[in-house]
Structure formats: C-alpha cells, structure tokens
Image (cartoon, grey):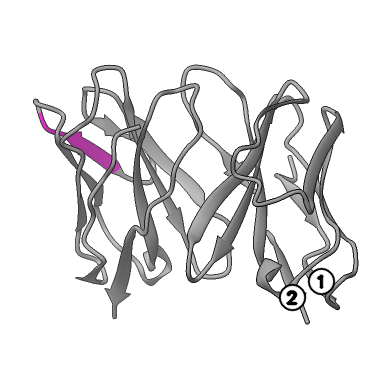
Amino acid sequence: DAKTTQPPSMDCAEGRAANLPCNHSTISGNEYVYWYRQIHSQGPQYIIHGLKNNETNEMASLIITEDRKSSTLILPHATLRDTAVYYCIVSLPERQLTFGSGTQLTVLP
Amino acid sequence: DAGVIQSPRHEVTEMGQEVTLRCKPISGHNSLFWYRQTMMRGLELLIYFNNNVPIDDSGMPEDRFSAKMPNASFSTLKIQPSEPRDSAVYFCASSFSGEYNEQFFGPGTRLTVL
C-alpha cells in the first residue's frame, strides 16, 4: 500500500473551513484514498473515501488532485467537536487499512 | 444498530494472568478486525477475519496472543500470559467486505497489565 504524508498538527478557528492536506505520491491506479478521524478516547470513525473524483458527504468533502498524488479533506464549518486526529490512508478496497500518525486538528473557539 | 460492542471497557490485571477481550460486530458485517493502540506504536492491525476465517494474523505480536471467531456475531482476543508491555487500548472493528473499506470501530478496551 502507498504511504501517506500529513502535517502533524493544524489549528482552525471555529466556524471556518478546515483543510487537511495529504500527500500520497506513490499511489497506484486502483488504490483508494480513505479518511478517518479519532476523537480523544474513542475508536476511529470513517469520514469519506474516493478514487479519482471529488467526493462529498454530510461530514466532509474530499478533493483529489488530477494526478492523484495528493488530496485535501475539507470540513466546511469546523466545530469544537471536530477536534481530533485525522488519518489519511491509501489502500486497495479489499486490503486492510494501515494507520499512520495522522494530523492533530485543533479547532479553536 | 448498537454498533460494534466491546467488553470489558476497562481491564486491569496482573502480569501472568490470562486476559480475554470480546467483540460483537455489527450485524450483517462479514469482516472483523482487531487493532492495538499505544502512544509509541500508534494504531496497529493485529488480525482480521473474513466470513469468520482468519485471513491475516501477521500483526499478532507473539504466541501469547490468539484470536477466534466462532460465529459471525462474536470474536475474542486472548492474551496468555499477559505482560506489562501488553498495556494498550484494543479496538475491534467490523465492515462489509464490499468495494470499499469502511470500517466501524468499537469503543475499545483499555487494558492495563501491572
């Protein structure tokens, strides 16, 4: 599975958009990009995934560059409850997920 | 659905004792995963099952660890004998092994081995 690179930490003001970047320059053509988050003392939570096209659901938007070497998770209106570690994972659909160290997002009041 | 259920939520035991962690996956899911999380090593996959069959146990640290899935609604992770370095949060997750890998995690079991 391709490896990912994420900044270790980011801050975001409450109510503003949080844009979390992820580099995955060695991604292969059939690998998906998955995003999970882990709020303190809880199990990880699935957020969104995509292959080539941009995706949006009730939680977030996922923007994948045309060359698929990087992506951005967007939380459109961050709240204090979005403070968590966000994991970007690249994997084949039938393969297990490998969690890295993620990005600690802190939403500030 | 109640989500993935794990028990106990907290376990404190002494070195050398046997520890059994339990997991009930979401009904209808046919893949089940056991993870371990520590500050030093992060979140690590220990073993996963598909249709109750162990597929990959390469993450199981040593023979002291064993996992079973006797049926689609129950799995156990056993540590015998336990050691202080086994102290961690153990998560169980389940998914439907379809086109994408959306795993649902339980609340975890915090294990402390004294």
Where's residue A10, x and y in %?
Answer: 22, 68
Where's residue A37, x and y in %?
Answer: 43, 54
Q: Residue at x 77, y 65 (%)?
A: B9
Q: Chain of mark 2?
A: B
Q: Mark 2 and mark 1 in contact (Cβ < 8 Å)?
A: yes
Instruction: Give the number of the mark in front: 1 or 2.
Output: 2
Q: Nearer the viewer, residue B34 or B104?
A: B34
Residue occupied by mark 2: B112
Q: Nearer the viewer, residue B64 or A79?
A: B64
Point out which mark residue A4 bears. none
Residue occupied by mark 1: B11
Read off the magenta span. A61-65
Q: Residue at x 19, y 37 (%)?
A: A63
Q: Residue at x 48, y 69 (%)?
A: B40
**Would residue A105 be seen by someone viewing this image from the given angle?**
yes
Q: Residue at x 30, y 17 (%)?
A: A30
Q: Nearer the viewer, residue B64 or B90?
A: B64
Q: How many labels, in total?
A: 2
- Residue B90: name its quadrant: bottom right
Q: Report helix, strand or loop for mark 1.
A: strand
- Tell me the CA gap for discs 1 and 2: 6 Å
Q: Quadrant of the C terminus of chain B?
A: bottom right
Image: B78 above or below A24? below
- Residue A24: name its quadrant: top left
Q: Report helix, strand or loop for mark 2.
A: strand
Q: Chain of mark 1?
A: B
Amino acid type indicated by mark 1: Glu
Image: A33 above or below A23? above
The stretch drawn in magenta includes residue B81: no
Where's residue A59, x and y in %?
Answer: 38, 46
Amino acid type indicated by mark 2: Thr
Magenta span main SS: strand
